Amino acid sequence: MEAKGSKPVMVIGGGIAGLQAAIDLGDMGIKVHLIESKPSIGGRMAQLDKTFPTNDCSICILSPKMAECYRHPNITLHTYSEIKEVSGKMGDFSVKVLKKARFVKEKECIGCGDCAAKCPVRVLDEFDMELRRRGAVYLYFLQALPMVMTIDRDNCLYLTRGVCRICEKVCTRQAIDFEQKDTEIDLDVGGIIVATGFDPFNPIGLSEYGYKRYRNVVTALEYERLICASGPTGGHLLRPSDRKPAEKIAFIQCVGSRDVKNNSYCSAVCCMHVTKEAILAREHDPKTQSYVFYMDMRAVGKGFQRYITRGEEEYRIKYIRGRVAKITEDLEGNPIIWYEKTIGPTTEKMKVDLAVLATSFVPRRGTEELAKILGVELDEYGFFKTEPYAPFNSTREGIFVCGCCREPVDIPDSVAQASGAAAKAAEIVTGGYS
Amino acid sequence: MEEEVKTFKNLQREVVDRGLCGKCGGCYSFCSAGELNALEIGENDLPRYSDEEKCLKCGICYLICPQINVLNNDLKARFGWEPPIGSYQSISSARTKDPNVMKVCTDGGVVTSLLLYLLDHDLIEGAIVSKKRGPFAREPTIAFTRDDIIAAAGSQYTESFHLEELGGKYSTYSTVLPQVKSLERKYLRNIAVVGTPCQINTIRKMQCLGVLPAHLIEYTIGLFCVENFSFDDLARERLEKRLNIDLADIQRLNIKDDFIVTLSNEITIHIPLEEIDMVARPACLTCSDFANEYADISVGGLGSLDGYTTTVVRTNKGANLFRDVLQGGYIDEVEYRNTDERKIDKTKMLAKIVSFSTRKRSRAEKRLRELSRS
């Protein structure tokens, strides 16, 4: 099916929101160019272990969507690519896209990993939240699509120092191509959907929590990798310092959120993902005891309140209303949580095996630059600016936004917004809009 | 036309065949840890091709060799190297506070204490140290437990900071470093290495390139080093002749201002260092690093009272470690009666290290000039 004569739509960002928007448009018969800056589509959802409130395996839900997008006759994927320039107007945008060289021939590479196995370089892996190391030639993650290797030009010894070329020598398909150059492609599109997602807030500035100073203080996204079967510990919840199982875990809510010094907004999903993370810990090991230190539990969504109740009743999560003043560390590397309860006059402390910081959602690095290129405005927090009654319209006609780049939202909301934004973009390119 | 990458063939020609190989094991460690398996350690502990067909001509073994200068400027920049003894933050004389360590260490026991601290605090999973097999033979080993470390201390460090400085033929970590890769698993793990300047040099060069297995090495503790001896039969004969003793009688080797040999009958012989050069390994004569200039912390007996270790704290990582180990009560510094005494002693220590460093550097320059002429 193809909507006759319609211009394509460009979707920026290949996470769950971008994938959904692209699939919706593609299914309407509209051509889509999906631009992803990373070597693979998948986005943040690919990094999660499970999703709430169903405890579904995140990648198991995401992978079919990635595959659908990858194979869709109306969708053209541009991974490892960045937007350089946008001109024109609604219905008729010209876009320059920089397609970065992978130094791997996408048509030849089958993702077998022979090159990665022999690459002698070791650098911290971004996808696994730097809890593991990888080679300079690597697969972005196990279920990556396209399933092809990428050479990291900043660390490859041939590209930086002119030696090595081991990957080229061991590749049986001659898929390594050091001659590859970055290329610029021009796209003509009728509408643009921005779905660039979020970064987790870096809590290093909140020195009271001791992040990076105490090894057993991790962020929630790091925790997701630790408990994920394809993560650096093979899914065993082992704390970083001594790889001993974490049996007593403190989750600290609103780290950087609802905090006038950092991000005054609520990040919307932490109450839920922390409940999920505590449930998962108990599912891994029934001995596990989790404590959630919170200001307010916000369970705004279908089945969410019930999920929290289940957490309390079936998984014995203890929710403690109060702020954590600081975290210290004892001689065995155990985090000590110092907190004040809203009920009761005293400050208390608790020794745990692992402390998890539920860090707020902030706009992806590079959002400001992208907004400039797109000619759209950002709100006071750096998310894309939208109006309450036109929630997917950016400040420029023909450019729509959805998912966590407009506000922190959970997966169901991201998907709903993506479909909404796709519908708005379709109006333009199918000529119904005037 | 692309420039040919220099490979182990060049390393053989430029280093091994000219007798300049220090047997640090860097090339072999890299090649086997990378599972390229083209190299092995052959006779006399020298690296050689095990299977030349397997060599992928990556050129990395060439770059990481301590005798090859390509990466020297990178290293200097990375560590803020400056003459005459490299970058450092402080120098002190320290010793262990642990009675168990003290029992087995006739020296200050600082290395052992540093390693115990790192292990106790889960900062490392293990440490590569060398164990003594006999007066002139060493065997590398990975110490995983307190007991392992103290055992290594007992045999190695007792007589041995000083022995390390002067050598004794020890094999290096070379047979161990490749195995370290098995520690890599998937999760981040770290180890510490105690080594001579050439060993630390090759590790730092690997780290400069970001290659395995050096990525697992979180802490480097460097030993001061004048030279190592090559104890083949000929050298042994020469040394015995010069000293007029039987090497088997040697109880202890030491170095303060000269080379001190203590025999089993407690007789002590002093020999000027210049005379000892005659039996030094050729590789050592071209090495310009006495004070282990790229380690996190360098240690040796030079400049300290008996029972203390001279400790040069170099990198920020080293400084943090030294501070924590002091605060943790693992070691203490020598006590001074007043600040003047402290100042004078530190100046003296520094002066000794500078003088040994300068001597080694000029010896290396001279030797290299001779080599380039011949």
Image (cartoon, grey):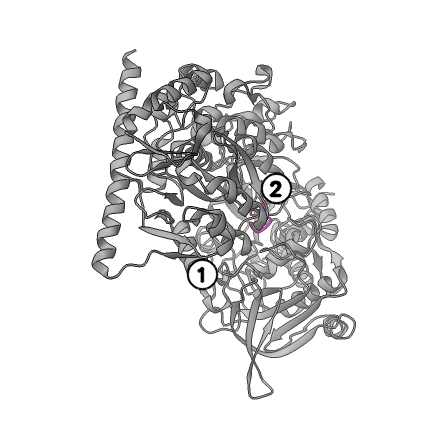
Q: Spot the residue most to the front.
A: B265
Please tell me whether mark 2 sits on a helix, a strand or a loop. Answer: helix
Give the chain of mark 2.
B
Left/right placement of residue B153 relative to residue B271 reads right
Q: Which residue is mark 1?
A: B329
Q: Is residue B363 above or below residue A275?
A: above
Q: Residue at x 60, y 64 (%)?
A: A356
Left/right placement of residue B306 relative to residue B136 reads left
Quadrant hosting residue A120: top right
Q: Earlier in the sequence, mark 1 or mark 2?
A: 2
Q: Which residue is mark 2?
A: B183
Q: Quadrant of the C terminus of chain A?
A: bottom right
Q: Is residue A129 magenta?
A: yes
Give the chain of mark 1.
B
Q: x, y percentage for residue B311?
A: 36, 48
Q: Amino acid at mark 2?
A: Leu
Left/right placement of residue A243 relative to residue B75 reads right
Mark number for residue A99? none
**Magenta region:** A126-132
State how far apart marks 1 and 2 are (Cα).
Answer: 30 Å
Q: Spot the residue most to the right.
A: A314
Choose between B164 and B255: the one closer to the eye.
B255
Q: Residue at x 38, y 51 (%)?
A: B316
Left/right placement of residue A337 relative to residue B283 reads right
The crowd level at tag 1 (other Cα within 10 Å; few <14, some 14-19, many 20+) is few
Choose between B39 and A170: the one closer to the eye.
B39
The reply to the same-chain question for discs 1 and 2 is yes
Q: Amino acid at mark 1?
A: Gly
